[in-house]
Amino acid sequence: MDFATPAPEPILSHALSTDTTRLLGLTAIRRAAGTVPCGAVELDLRHRWWAGEAGRFDPDAVDVPIAAVWLPPLPSEPGPERTRWAVLTERVANEWRPAKVVVELPRGDIDHRVGRMVGDLFTFFGDIGSDRSRLAVGIPTADLHGGRTNLVQLRALRRFTEEWEVDVAVDVSGQLDQQWEAEAGIARLGHRLTLIRVPGDALLPVPVGRPRVAMRALHAALDPQWPLCVSVVPRVPLWSRTAPAVVARAYAEAAARLEERVRQRRVELPLDMREPRHGQRLHPPA
């Protein structure tokens, strides 16, 4: 490597999560994300609030990339609910064309759920993970808690996802257990982790409490040789959550803070760890 040449940044992209506000429609949030350089949107359909709007969503209305779509857990038993889930999932994958389709793990011990779930997912998706959108298993915040048992379960999840060649997404933006061993947990997931959702407060210069744990997880996930999408949930005042310009500004500020954290992390890495192999940089070359 030429020491006179600045070391390239980690392979990173960012997206605005619809969890930022539920007072704007999916298309309005997507349009706000498009005002930020290299902006993208992450659509979370796990909440019934958004599930109803999904039927009216036009994926071609705005030319802004969809980094990921989070879906609720696959219903375990056949029936109308499972049929509705399958219809929505098929539409998301074939018409919305996100970079990643994330299916949340159902409640319970991770190692007891993931094997059957991933097999069932491939019954629905077929080869979706290879020629349309990448398929990912989503870990909600509630599944991240302190203790060795959780680390063992995360390692089991990685083993299953490696076997089925699917990705892992982690949401650390919620009520995160402050006893969770963030660095160890992220290390257990390895390079299967390709999406992490963080609260905007985790990008502050000195985060405290739960945002600090989320910041530690983000730092652990920043690998200069593997692609990672960081979905952000920036803090927006309640009285401004119907204003697309305010949401867009909050996203721009979060993206700038993320870039600064990447620079800081880049300085900390050894020189021979700074050259990416493939993927997309945080910003395109000038």
Image: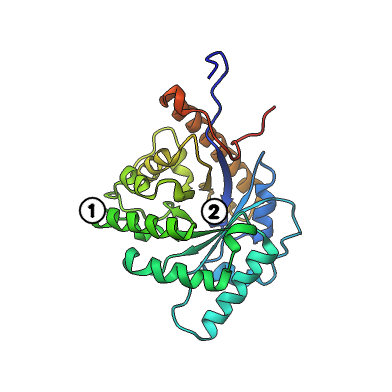
Q: Residue furthest right?
A: 61
Which residue shows up at 56% across the image and 75% down it? 85
Q: Which residue is mark 2?
A: 20
Dot label at residue 148: 1
Which residue shows up at 58% across the image and 75% down it? 86
Along the viewing direction, whichever of 183 and 178 lies nearer the viewer: 183
Could you tell which of marks 2 and 1 lies nearer the N-terminus?
A: 2
Along the viewing direction, whichever of 266 and 42 lies nearer the viewer: 266
Q: Is residue 230 above or below residue 239?
A: above
User: Which quarter of the figure is the C terminus placed in?
Assistant: top right
Along the viewing direction, whichever of 218 and 221 lies nearer the viewer: 221
Q: Is residue 278 above or below residue 243?
A: above
For residue 233, say whether it is visible.
Answer: no
Residue 110, x across and y down, in percent: 34, 64
Q: Amino acid at mark 2?
A: Thr
For residue 138, say whether it is visible.
Answer: yes
Which residue shows up at 40% across the image and 46% down it? 190
